[in-house]
Image (cartoon, rainbow, N blue to C red):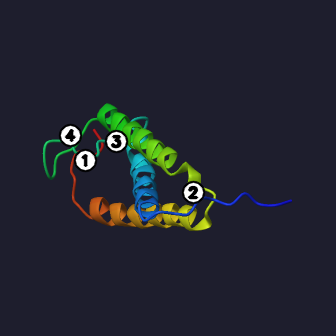
Amino acid sequence: MTAIASPKRGWHVLPIAAIAGMLFANALPHTIAGPLILWLPTPFSGGPGTLSSPMVNVLWGLSNIAIGAWLVRVIRKWTNDPGVRWTMVIAAAAFLVFLTWAIGSLPLPGRFR
């Protein structure tokens, strides 16, 4: 049984894979924030130190999932490549660590209302 070879990977594939991984990682806390009634910052919260409602967080999380899935569709020819998969996983993990450090270290009163 022979493996199907992926087409030659262009320069754009790994950055797109990394961005897709980061979008999926960013979707996780925002999508979960709604059912947990958490107020978290989003680009729509009105500036630094302000928080968005749980519904805005869910919509922001779902939009991250949709854009990430679209980016994976763009590079679908190369998703069998382990390098592309590892790029997505490592970018997602690194972004989750960064988000935890950046958001978790800020005093955000009113996160639970």
Real-space Cα distance between discs 2 and 1?
34 Å
The residue shown at (42%, 65%) is: 11
Quadrant including the C terminus: top left
The residue shown at (33%, 39%) is: 60
User: Residue 31 in the image: x percent, y percent?
Assistant: 42, 40
Comparing labels 4 and 1, the label whose residue is closer to the camera: 4
User: Residue 68 in the image: x percent, y percent?
Assistant: 44, 46
Mark 3 residue type: Leu
| Residue 46 seen from this side | yes
Q: Is residue 43 above or below residue 100?
A: above
Give left or right: position of 35 versus 109: right
Give me the disc on residue 44: 4
| Element carrying mark 2 | helix
Give me the disc on residue 78: 2
Real-space Cα distance between discs 3 and 2?
37 Å
Quadrant including the N terminus: bottom right
| Element carrying mark 4 | loop
Give me the disc on residue 41: 1
Real-space Cα distance between discs 3 and 4?
15 Å
In the rendered image, the residue lying farthest to the front is 8
Comparing labels 3 and 4, the label whose residue is closer to the camera: 4
Residues under numbered marks 4 and 1 in contact, where contact means CB atoms less than 8 Å apart: no
Give me the disc on residue 38: 3
| Element carrying mark 1 | loop
**Residue 101, quarter of picture:** bottom left
**Between 45 and 10, the one nearer to me in the picture:** 10
Mark 2 residue type: Trp
